[in-house]
Amino acid sequence: MRPLEIESLGFSYEDGTVALENVSLSLERGEKVAIVGPNGAGKSTLLHLIAGFRMPFTGKVLIDSQTLTESSADDLRKMVGLLFQDPDDQIFMPTVEEDVAFGPRNLRLDDIDGRVSKGLRSAGVETLAKRKPHKLSYGMKKRVAIAGIMAMDPNILLLDEPTSGLDPRARSGLIKLLKGMDRSMLIATHDLEAAAEIVDRAVVLNVGILMEGTMRDLVMSRDVLERAGLEIPPVSRLFSVLGSMGYSVDALPVSMDQAVAQLSKVIDREGRHIHAHVHEHDHKSVESSQ
Ligand SMILES: Nc1ncnc2c1ncn2[C@@H]1O[C@H](COP(=O)(O)OP(=O)(O)OP(=O)(O)O)[C@@H](O)[C@H]1O
Ligand SMILES: [Mg+2]
């Protein structure tokens, strides 16, 4: 049973704005998928629809094989955790710890204290437990909102721009956390490098789906990048330039980790090559001196 299936989904806002058209995608259990696309592509709308926050839509959304309807939305919402793009839409309790406890309490889950400390720890905000959320900085609020989602430990994670506004250390901590989680997730993001670290697959959205594939496929697809207004990360650009200079580059890395892995293979290969040459040379010079 797939945790999420979406068939020919379409949605327009009351003012007539068409936000999504004929979107079909599914998530396997434990699969992580990035939703990328320009501003206004419908990424947030898509996540809100799946979380049961917007109706009516055309097409079908199935969560654990159950059809999402107005009457099933309350029940199905328990299975999905949505991290809002703007943390101010998410946090509203007087203290951080109460805010993180709100979700699990609302779902009547057990071990609230344990869940709260786990959530706070996973987002690295234990020290903020007693603070007033609305007095925190944007990045700190974002981390508190992440703590709240983690405390609920939902089956499907829907993360809307999870890395935006985070400082570098918090960003890499979050990447590590999400990468290590054995959970199905959809991540709407402009952060292609983070996505490359975390996800198995990417979906390029611009009202409709433009492409589906790996992040490496995506950075090699100039036409899609152009149509989706996406820029490839500097590390991919570097390899692309090396490729055009004649160096053999079979696939473009998207993240620094991928680049290091790719480069160390080349260095390894070339290193051995150089080593072999030197060896051969030594051998010859020994022979000629005899
Ligand atoms: N409440 C609303 N009423 C009318 N139109 C809306 C509303 N919210 C979003 N839209 C429109 O729906 C479209 C999709 O917006 P959405 O916020 O889903 O895009 P996005 O891909 O998340 O963009 P971003 O990268 O800026 O977060 C846009 O054209 C937007 O203007
Ligand atoms: Mg958005």
Image (tube, grey):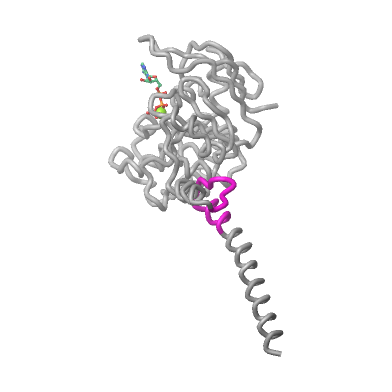
Quadrant containing the N terminus is: top right
Residue at 61 percent across and 58 percent down: it is 265
Q: Quadrant of residue 138?
A: top left
Query: What are the residue bounds of the magenta stretch?
Result: 247-263
Quadrant containing the C terminus is: bottom right
> Is residue 133 left or right of 195 when viewed as pictured?
left
How far across and how far down the image is residue 70, in percent?
53, 12
Residue at 57 percent across and 22 percent down: it is 76
How far across and how far down the image is residue 152, in percent?
53, 36
How far across and how far down the image is residue 137, in percent?
30, 43
> Is residue 126 left or right of 276 when viewed as pictured?
left
Ligand 1, seen in the image, is in the quarter at top left
Q: Quadrant of residue 7?
A: top right
Magenta residue check for 257:
yes
Magenta residue check for 250:
yes
How far across and how far down the image is residue 64, in percent?
65, 24
- Above or below 43: residue 19: above
- Above or below 2: residue 166: below
Along the line of sight, which residue is nearer the eye, 211 or 116?
211
Residue at 42 percent across and 47 percent down: it is 234
Along the line of sight, which residue is nearer the eye, 206 or 25?
206
- Above or below 266: residue 196: above
Q: Is residue 213 visible?
A: yes
> Is residue 39 left or right of 255 when viewed as pictured?
left
- Above or below 98: residue 67: above
Please, which residue is most extreme toward the left here? 135
Q: Is residue 122 visible?
A: no
Please, which residue is most extreme toward the bottom here? 290
User: Number of callouts in the render?
Assistant: 0
Q: Quadrant of residue 263?
A: bottom right
